[in-house]
Image (cartoon, helix red, strand yellow):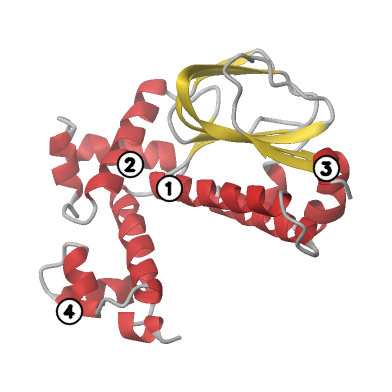
Amino acid sequence: MNRKENISIQPFDSSKVDYSDPDYYQVLWLKHGFIFVVIDLEEFEATPNTICFLSPDRSVIISFSSKATGFILRFSKSFFQELIREDMNIKEAALLSVSGQIPKIILSPKIGDRVHEIAEMIDELCGSEIPNKEAAVASLLKTLLIYCDSKCNIRLNGHTNRNKIRLVTTYKELVAKHFTTVHQVNEFATMMNISPKYLSQVVSEILGVTAKSVIVEQLMIKARHDLKFSNQSVKEIAFGLGFSEPFHFSNFFKKEFGVSPTEFRYT
């Protein structure tokens, strides 16, 4: 397998606007600095942390600023058929479907960070001579697709209200920034100058989950990471996440994950 022909990952070129490609599947990661995207004549606003999954023959026009950050992951039809599709479940494969609606998703900020890290790992593998690297790249791509299936991501379609998308995106960004000190939906609603009831309604409509669950997701991602990959005590982690007492954190963690923080750390 020739990696140059089968898979590549690269930044966007500011001198180029047309990214159509009849021979490759493409994953467009629009982290920030993008203005709009036109896919098959459908134009939509390029909200930060947007990711698009394109099958071959899709027409793609992108407008972005000089400081845009993101990447294009391209892989051949044979790479998809041989190393990816066979092991995918139906939900994951739908993101790379050759027909139907184009998957366009706004990622939760923390998941966006994970996607960026996966892209860096894919790029590192593509430039290496590691044995079985194609299989490793395929595994990472499937991991990326699984992350994109998070309930706290926004799936865009032509009928989605843009104002509500912006509101939910702002909410998720605020949660990502303040979740270690602010745990209540009503406090975020105050920051946004809207009522908690309206915020909850819009989040439920756009994401299909509660506004509270967006906060919980951020807390759980950070808690699990710190328990597994830091030397902090459970007490230190609890205080770092904004819990007034360690037992409140332990009760929260066990309710969400089914085991205590200490049990999770050593399993």
Give the image quarter of residue 239: bottom left
- Horizontal relation, residue 198 to residue 29: left or right: left
What separation in Å lies between label 3 and label 4 (alpha carbons)? 52 Å
Local crowd size for mark 3, using a 10 Å CA cut-off: few (<14), some (14–19), many (≥20): some
Instruction: Name which residue type carries label 3.
Output: Asn
Q: Earlier in the sequence, mark 2 or mark 3?
A: 3
Observer-side mark, 1 or 2, equals 2
Picture quarter containing residue 253? Answer: bottom left
Residue type at mark 4? Answer: Phe
Residue 152 is tagged as 1
Q: Are marks 4 and 2 in contact (CB under 8 Å)?
A: no
Q: Secondary structure at mark 4?
A: helix
Which residue is label 4 attached to?
247
Compute the Cα span from label 4 to label 1: 27 Å
Disc sitting over residue 172 in the figure: 2
Residue at which label 3 appears = 6
Circle nearer the N terminus (4, 1):
1
Q: What residue is at 43 percent from the left and 47 percent from the top?
A: 152
Q: Can you say whether 12 is above or below 2 in the image?
A: above
Q: Mark 3 falls on what kind of element?
A: helix
Give the mark toward the camera: 2 or 3: 3
Q: On the rendered structure, is 266 left or right of 1?
A: left
